[in-house]
Amino acid sequence: MMPDLEEYKWIVPDFVWELDEHIDFEKLMKALPDAADLAKLLPDFDKIGESFTSLKGFFSPGSPGETAFRATDQGYDNDKQYKKVSDKEKIDQLQEELLRTQLKYQRMLERLEKENKELRKLVLQRDDKGIHQRKLKKSLIDMYSEVLDILSDYDASYNTQDHLPRVVVVGDQSAGKTSVLEMIAQARIFPRGSGEMMTRSPVKVTLSEGPHHVALFKDSSREFDLTKEEDLAALRNEIEIRMRNSVKEGCTVSTETISLSVKGPGLQRMVLVDLPGVISTVTSGMAPDTKETIFSISKAYMQNPNAIILCIQDGSVDAERSIVTDLVSQMDPQGKRTIFVLTKVDLAEKNVASPSRIQQIIEGKLFPMKALGYFAVVTGKGNSSESIDSIKEYEEEFFQNSKLLKTCMLKAHQVTTKNLSLAVSDCFWKMVRESVEQQADAFKATRFNLETEWKNNYPRLRELDRNELFEKAKNEILDEVISLTQVTPKHWEEILQKTLWERVSTHVIENIYLPAAQTMNSGTFNTTVDIKLKQWTDKQLPNKAVEVAWETLQEEFSRFMTEQKGKEHDDIFDKLKQAVKEESIKRHKWNERAEDSLRVIQHNALEDRSISDKQQWDAAIHFMEETLQSRLKDTESVIEDMVGPDWKKRWLYWIGRTKEQNIRNETKNELEKLIKCNEEHAAYLANDEVTTVRKNLEARGITVDPCLIKDTWHQIYRRYFLKTALNHCNLCRRGFYYYQRHFVDSELECNDIVLFWRIQRMLAITANTLRQQLTNTEVRRLEKNVKEVLEDFAEDNEKKVKLLTGKRVQLAEDLKKVREIQEKLEAFIEALHQEK
């Protein structure tokens, strides 16, 4: 009829199960008398019965003994009262004796544990130094923690990552969650603040045994020595920085988990997750959704059916003000995986008028929630500078003198963080053993489903995860950058010369050639050209040339990056290549000294007027003709827009002229008459000529603004001048002979051909210089920038996730994660069986 108490063995202190190590029960049993000897020692119950019968007659009413009995009645009452007092004292003495015995065994147990801890530390240190010449295997808890770290990064829709056990520490803000965790970790590792929210994101703490008391982050190799105060301060600061960095703008808390490992002699192996404290009100400075976010984070961790909930309740405040107990009772209504911890019991004992209220809390009678176990702890006197050892001493001293233990309101195994740590660790490992194999099977099924999906969708492709795809793309990009060095010098120079002329042709024609040519004087033409070329070379030309070279390099680089390679082209890399191209170009800076050297080269090239042969002369004429024809075409187009379509277009396409176009057309006709009258007319209209044109138009009933006349004249004269210049080019085709004789005894002057030859030669020399700069220096510098960008991208996981996307990438990522988790789980299960 007795219940099975196997599951509740962890509640009983370990020293009770270890009594047989200290007491020889077999020897004690031999010393006791056997059954026959015990029977001889027992009294004769038949004789006692006869004596009671005679006594009955003696005390019957009216008997001789009645008077005597009454006479001694008062004395008997006094004796009875004395007996009651003495019984109470005996009970108190027995309770004190029991407490002393418990504390004696507790101290004995602690002494043995301390010795064991020192011995284990020595063994671990010897192994750490390699005395046994063997490689230490990873501890069980480290293997398990690795699985949880991978799961925290695994963001798939299978929802299996939440079903592995961990100890979830929840509580109201400032209830003492962090202090309890620090007592379990035996170090002040968390940032502290008076009343303000310090835990802003979940912190996963993996506790394991090791020779040295150290802490390190999952993504860092630095070890913090927890025995040194400066390292502790640095660790607290690092945790606070990581928390603040994980919180997004406009938020107060973050869902991003900070992973921390703590090793040290005597630490209980387990994985704990410290969550932000539950709040009832959003205060100033907090985001409006802070309360809901904390609730959702807490629920997300607690709804895991295998998570152990460590519910922390502040004993120094009214129990009715607690929020977390309602939340915990919703997530675990039967209390099958909840451990309740009452903190600040020392303050509670001082402040609470009725000590039985604390007993009600500890026994779970004051709250609707149920729990596996109830514990009471003291985590210090409220001074943040207290050491862990001093807090332990204070806790032991408090419970040794506390009425809660003396009056049996609390049992010895329900107090101190030491007992709490042992109980939580036992419960954690029990849950791990019960659930880990089931989770391994779930991942095996998930892996099979993913592999099947890959075979059906991508039968001819290898399973490359995001990092492997990035490496493949990296090699392709570097190959394409190297391809820039294979571009021929001829191609570089052609594209540079063409692009540079497109950029500077407008300036050359409008600001140098036309103003000089319209002077109608050979000496003035050359003087004007020389002055303007010098000004142009000193200020604008070198800078413009460098800009053209830089843009040409960008265009060629872009062409190689975006050019599809036929069937081998993989569009999954397009976004990455585009981002690498943009970032590399952004970082690339052209050599500043190149501009100064280029200025000297260009100036020398433009100073040279000597055309050596007829071929160069013809090339200059051809260059000038192409340029002028292009400008003439543009001018014709502008005039057509001004005056509207001619009679052919009007008849063929039924297009009419607007009123303004009619006025412009009439003005154009008047201005053309002026040019016909004077073919050597200057570039600008005189005021009297403007008046004459206006009056002629008014005589025909057309009112014209003088500005419109001048604007129209500019385009009409420009067309006339360009046609004249083209005719002059034809005349100069036979002028090379006269050029060699410096046009002596000849009316033909071809200074404009010489100008275009100087421009053409300058373009060729500039293109050659820029090509050398590109191939010798800039392409290599760009390649270096690309490598730096790729290295930066390789370290930035967020960037890779953003740039390498798609179903194929996600499926490969899931497969990699699931395989890794399954393999690590199987290795953990094997190690777990070996330890058992």
Image: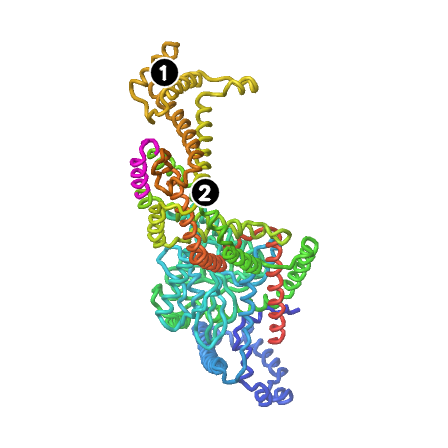
**Image quarter of residue 233:** bottom left
As drawn, the label of residue 619 is 2
Side of 207 relative to 26 (left or right): left
Sequence order check: which comes first, mark 2 or mark 1? 2
Q: Which range is magenta?
A: 517-534
Give the image location of residue 662, x and y in percent: 44, 16
Q: What element carries label 1?
A: loop
Q: Name the residue under label 1.
A: 704
Residue nearest the observer in this picture, 311 or 558: 558
Q: What element carries label 2?
A: helix
**Residue at coordinates 35% horizontally, 63% vertically from top-left?**
382
Can you see residue 782?
yes
**Residue at coordinates 51% horizontally, 51% vertically from top-left?**
296
As drawn, the label of residue 217 is none
**Image quarter of residue 336:** bottom right
Can you see residue 320?
no
- Residue type highlighted by circle 1: Val
Whole-angstrom CA distance, mark 2 to mark 1, is: 45 Å
Q: Residues within 10 Å of mark 1 (few under 14, many from 20)?
A: some
Residue 530 within the magenta-colored segment of the rendering:
yes
**Image quarter of residue 151:** bottom right
- Residue type highlighted by circle 2: Ala
